[in-house]
Image (tube, rainbow, N blue to C red):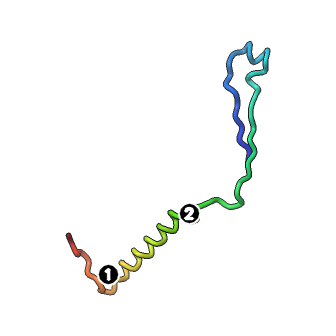
Amino acid sequence: MRLKAHEAFKSVEEALVHNADIQSVTTHFETPSRRIMVSDTDTGEAIREQIGDLRLLLDAYRTGTIEPGGGA
């Protein structure tokens, strides 16, 4: 992948005398073969754990192990 940055245009005179409007900097960098997803991060692992806990809670409600509305 390539990222290009251009100098700010100063004036017509600068552009004609010094080619100031044409100067730019190019940076090349490697891109991963696959995008990094949230699921690939520590946050993704925490979310997977929460989903597991919620599934267990839902199963407990469905089987009657616990009753909804324990209220506070």
Disc 1 element: helix
* Pointer 2 with pointer 1, Cβ within 8 A: no
Task: Indicate the position of residue 56 as horizontal and vertical percent values.
Answer: 39, 80
Asked if 10 appears above or below 52 in the picture, the reply is above
Q: In which quarter of the image is residue 62?
A: bottom left
Q: Nearer the viewer, residue 32 or 61?
A: 32
Judged from this view, the residue extending furthest toward the top is 13
Residue with the mark numbered 2? 41
Residue with the mark numbered 1? 61
Residue visible at 74% across and 31% down in the picture? 24
Q: Nearer the viewer, residue 45 or 2?
A: 45
Disc 2 element: loop
Q: The C terminus appears in which quarter of the rendering?
A: bottom left
Task: Indicate the position of residue 14 as horizontal and vertical percent values.
Answer: 74, 16
Task: Indicate the position of residue 11 as horizontal and vertical percent values.
Answer: 69, 16
Asked whether, in this view, residue 14 is left or right of residue 57, the answer is right
Label 2 sits on what residue type? Thr
Asked if 35 appears above or below 52 in the picture, the reply is above
Asked if 15 appears above or below 65 in the picture, the reply is above
Q: In which quarter of the image is residue 21?
A: top right
Residue visible at 78% across and 21% down in the picture? 19
Category of crowding for the residue at label 2, using alpha-carbon neighbours closer than 10 angstroms: few (below 14), some (14–19), many (at least 20): few
Find the distance from the CA under tag 2 to the CA under tag 1: 31 Å
Q: In which quarter of the image is residue 67?
A: bottom left
Q: In terms of sequence position, does the residue under pointer 2 or pointer 1 come before the other? A: 2
Judged from this view, the residue extending furthest toward the front is 42
* Residue 36 - label: none
Residue visible at 74% across and 44% down in the picture? 2
